Image (cartoon, rainbow, N blue to C red):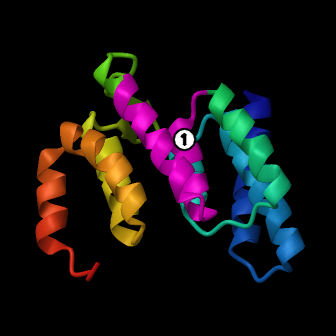
Amino acid sequence: MLYFELCLSKSRYLKDSHEKELTSSVKEGVDTLLIYLYRALNLVVEMESLASSKILVHSRMVEELETLLNESGHLRTLSFLCESKGMSSMALAIWRILARNYSFGFWKDQKQINETSGEAVNIIFGKETPATEASRILNELSDKDLILQHLRWIEKNNVDMIIFDLITNDKTH
């Protein structure tokens, strides 16, 4: 318990440091350490929030974090990290895996207690979540091949999202 509190305290300090004006190399180190601490403490919400922001993780650390997050089953966080690093194709592939795993019953809706706030938080909201996230990524891109590659499985998991995106999409392709 003391170790957990020490790590939690260190993560708060690093989060405060993350918000300050730092050189890019120091910010890379802070962001990387935060991901590692959040992973060690199993603070999934914080980890996903950080990974989905424009964090500065050195490119060689992305591969190491990819391995860590993949092996620990934190694929949602990995997808957010890939997206924030401009690796949309990889992020979409991960969401597709999550959708398939959910459909096959490997993943279930679950709640996890957010350690910092004590609230119960839905980690996976259903098989629609991967489709919704993938649709959001595709909506920001104009890569027709990537859209066509992922449209079928997104439609299968959340047809309402596809219809909504097609109706509200104001891009001209």
Residue 76 in the figure: left or right of residue 111: right
Residue 8 in the figure: left or right of residue 61: left
Which of 112/140 is in front?
140
Residue 32 part of the magenta-drawn span = no
Residue 38: x %, y % from top left: 67, 44
Residue 107 in the figure: left or right of residue 2: left
Direction front: furthest residue: 145
What residue is disc 1 on? 44
Q: Is residue 65 visible?
A: yes
Which of 165/25 is in front?
165
Q: Which quadrant holds residue 142?
A: bottom left
Residue 100 part of the magenta-drawn span = yes
Residue 90: x %, y % from top left: 56, 48
Residue plotted at (75% across, 51% down): 62
Residue 99: x %, y % from top left: 35, 33
Exactly how many numbered labels are in the figure?
1
Would you place residue 52 above or below residue 72 in this image?
A: below
Q: Secondary structure at mark 1?
A: helix
Q: Residues within 10 Å of mark 1 (few under 14, many from 20)?
A: many
The secondary structure making up most of the magenta span is: helix
Residue plotted at (84% across, 53% down): 60
Residue 58: x %, y % from top left: 82, 61
Direction top: furthest residue: 105
Q: Which residues are magenta?
A: 73-101
The C terminus, quarter of image: bottom left
The N terminus, quarter of image: top right
Would you place residue 144 above or below residue 153 in this image?
A: below
Residue 164 in the figure: left or right of residue 22: left
Would you place residue 128 above or below residue 138 in this image?
A: above
> Three-letter amino acid code at disc 1?
Val
